[in-house]
Amino acid sequence: MVVKEVIKVAIDLYEVQLLTADTFPSASLENEWVTAVWADACQHEGVKYRITPDLHKMLTRQGTHLHSKLKIKGHKTVTMYYNLKAGQSASAKDKNKKLVAKLLQDTGADHILFLYLAKEQAREAVMRQHIYRHPAIGNLINEYIFGDQNSLGVRYTEHLGNQLLKATIALASTCIEFCLKEWAEGHFDDTTFTVSENSVIFASHLADLDRFERLTIPHNLYRKLAAKLLANARYYASLGDLTDLAPTAGRMREQATDMNDNPLKH
């Protein structure tokens, strides 16, 4: 039936909004999105249907579904890329606990240590480079958004432009941070992904990305980061290159010239 196709397209478009605009939209923004994606879905199928309250509710629940699915991917990514080992021995748990505590330090410049490349994590804070470059971020984006030919990043690639949007990078980082916390006691503890806690973390990552972009404007580092993440994701999905991607320069320091306002700090 055509109406089923309209619903399917509307769900897809709503999830694209969650992935690229705001994964924790306000009630008013949800209403705007529902109206827009339903109209677009009807236009896509060449029909006109009035949206019902039940369909409206179904669309706004997509955020919960997205977070649950992303969390599953995030758990796999975190255990693989941060070398967390499941085990019942006291030594294994202690090793995991110390590692996670280090990665999630919430004081000083090391607050977001898990976002740096492993080799950068041992450096002094002022010397660290490549923030938001840890491969776990790219892997989670690749797996969830570009995992196969039916993924949203493949079917709705035109919505992504020529670089990943900050909301997408912030969402992946929020999920990784949450999944690391599930190992805080040295063993995996399956925890509910709540809006109240993670919307604050998401907003913090968005603010950090804004600050990173602002402080590194002379070197255009944010665009290079976002373009590289998208280029890697497209390669992962066998989509080919984007011809208008900005050329990437050699290895550059990811810090502003003003050492009193270090963009690498949280």
Image: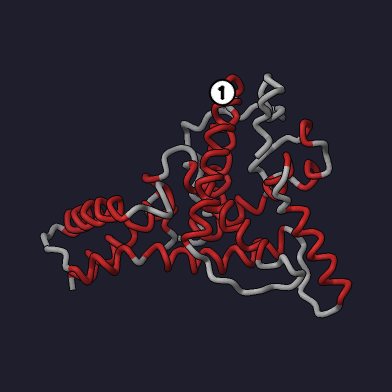
Residue in view at x 76 percent, y 35 percent: 128
Above or below, 92 against 70 in this view is below
* Front-lying residue, 39 or 177: 177
Q: Quadrant of the N terminus?
A: bottom left
Q: Residue 133, how many percent across, how many down?
A: 66, 43
Q: Residues within 10 Å of mark 1 (few under 14, many from 20)?
A: few
Quarter occupied by residue 11: bottom left
Q: Is residue 55 left or right of residue 117?
A: left
Identity of the amino acid at label 1? Ile
**Relative side of 122 to 212, left or right:** right
Quick one: which residue is furthest to the bottom in this view? Answer: 88
User: Is 66 displayed left or right of 228 in the figure?
Assistant: left
Colouring: secondary structure
Look at the numbered disc 1 and give the secondary structure of its residue: helix
- Quadrant of res 3: bottom left
> Seen in the image, is 177 located left or right of residue 231?
right
117 and 259: which is toward the camera? 259
Q: Is residue 156 above or below residue 163?
A: below
Residue 236 placement (x, y as % from top left): 57, 53
On screen, residue 141 above or below 52: above
Q: Residue at x 47, y 42 (%)?
A: 165
Closer to us: 15 or 64: 64
**Place of residue 219 in the rendered image (x, y in percent of width and height, measured from the top left):** 61, 22
Extreme residue in the right direction: 91
- The residue drawn where x is 65% and y is 54% is 136
The residue under label 1 is: 217
Q: Quadrant of the C terminus?
A: top right
